[in-house]
């Protein structure tokens, strides 16, 4: 019976990984409990409260883009519990990622009655051949602190756009532009258009979605009367298995878990297994944000 159970678990894991590789994203339900969500909401609200007006003025379409790195985590240690959460790491393990590493995160909070987020993909390793394979160099994990729907700004994704060329690759080759972030001239802008192959990804607080960094994603406008906060955490799920030059490239651009000497030892111990460490001598591959998918 035990052997049959293990075999079934492996089969299910294989199905989940195949779906993740095919579509570019997977949903995991009921991972975070209500108490942790409340604490994350409190910390996120506190981080938003200390931002100056210029921060929000520069992020009209996103709402906010607060960096989650070592100093941030030391100030708001509940984020370490999220990053190293056993349920989160267990979900990644179900996809075959047993030793993921953490890069950085963002507090992305759309205020009430704010515009949609533009279509974009976040691949920055497009000169690396690994980016053209089913192995994700980087993956986003998005945790929403309230239930999401198309009305309040849920995620939108174009399945499969991480592995095959989509018209958006040519229409919005530079997606994180000033005009897009500022929501300037949205009419006729393909970055804010609707596409026949897009899908909505509504989630409940406690769920999360994991996705390839190279899959096209966006978000609906928040037409509700409440803030909609998303915590986007960037992981390198297969870091130990990546080629050495890819590891060098990742280590050259990520400094997410550089905690200070004053950090509590228990905080450092919790995050240490997720730290990106590369001690080899390979030359990093230059960063390139432009895809050559065919």
Image: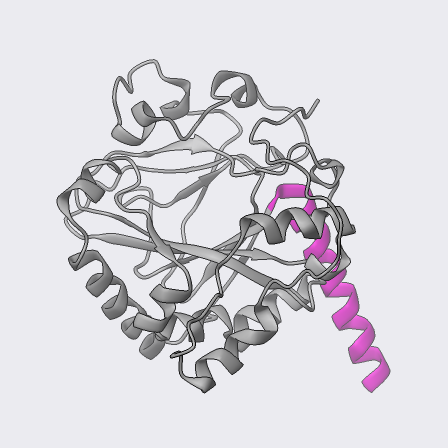
What's drawn in magenta, residue-wise?
A: 1-24
Q: Can residue 1 be seen in this view?
A: no
Q: How many marks?
A: 0
> Residue 117, relative to residue 207: is it above or below?
above
Residue drawn at (17%, 45%), measured in percent from left and top?
Answer: 112
Residue drawn at (82%, 86%), measured in percent from left and top?
Answer: 2
- Tell me where residue 139 appears, x and y as whole percent: 57, 51
Most extreme residue toward the top is 188
User: Quadrant location of the C terminus?
Assistant: top right
> Residue 105, relative to residue 121: is it above or below?
below
- Tell me where residue 51 appears, x and y as whole percent: 19, 53
23 within the magenta span: yes
Q: In this view, does 244 lie to the left or right of 24?
A: right
Q: Identify the coloring.
A: one colour
Query: In which image quadrant can residue 74 be found?
Result: bottom left
275 within the magenta span: no
- Tell me where residue 30 appears, x and y as whole percent: 46, 69
Q: In this view, does 187 lie to the left or right of 262?
A: left
Query: In which image quadrant can residue 86 be found?
Result: bottom right
- Tell me where residue 237 appears, x and y as whole percent: 64, 58
Between residue 57 and residue 245, name the one nearer to us: 245
Q: Is residue 22 left or right of residue 55?
A: right
- The secondary structure that most of the magenta stretch takes on is helix
User: Quadrant location of the N terminus?
Assistant: bottom right
Q: Can residue 244 be seen in this view?
A: yes
């Amino acid at each position: 019976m035990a052997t049959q159970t293990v075999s079934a678990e492996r089969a299910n894991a294989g199905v989940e990984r195949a779906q993740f590789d095919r579509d570019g994203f997977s949903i995991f339900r009921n991972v975070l409990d209500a108490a942790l969500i409340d604490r994350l909401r409190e910390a996120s609200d506190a981080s938003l409260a200390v931002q100056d007006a210029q921060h929000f003025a520069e992020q009209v379409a996103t709402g906010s883009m607060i960096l989650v790195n070592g100093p941030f985590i030391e100030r708001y240690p509940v984020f370490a519990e999220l990053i190293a959460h056993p349920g989160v790491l267990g979900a990644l393990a179900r996809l075959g990622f047993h030793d993921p590493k953490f890069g950085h995160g963002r507090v992305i909070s759309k205020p009430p009655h704010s515009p949609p987020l533009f279509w974009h993909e976040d691949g920055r390793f497009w000169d690396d051949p690994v980016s053209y394979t089913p192995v994700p160099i980087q993956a986003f994990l998005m945790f929403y602190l309230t239930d999401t729907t198309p009305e309040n700004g849920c995620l939108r994704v174009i399945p499969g756009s991480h592995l095959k060329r989509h018209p958006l690759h040519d229409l919005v080759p530079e997606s994180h532009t000033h005009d897009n972030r500022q929501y300037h001239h949205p009419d006729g802008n393909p970055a804010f258009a609707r596409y026949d192959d897009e899908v909505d990804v509504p989630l409940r607080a406690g769920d999360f979605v994991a996705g390839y960094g190279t899959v096209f994603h966006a978000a609906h406008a928040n037409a509700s009367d409440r803030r909609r906060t998303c915590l986007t955490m960037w992981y390198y799920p297969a870091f130990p298995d990546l080629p050495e030059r890819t590891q060098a490239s990742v280590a050259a651009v990520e400094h997410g878990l550089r905690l200070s000497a004053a950090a509590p030892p228990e905080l450092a111990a919790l995050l240490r297994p997720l730290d990106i460490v590369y001690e080899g001598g390979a030359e990093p591959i230059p960063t390139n944000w432009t895809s050559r998918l065919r």
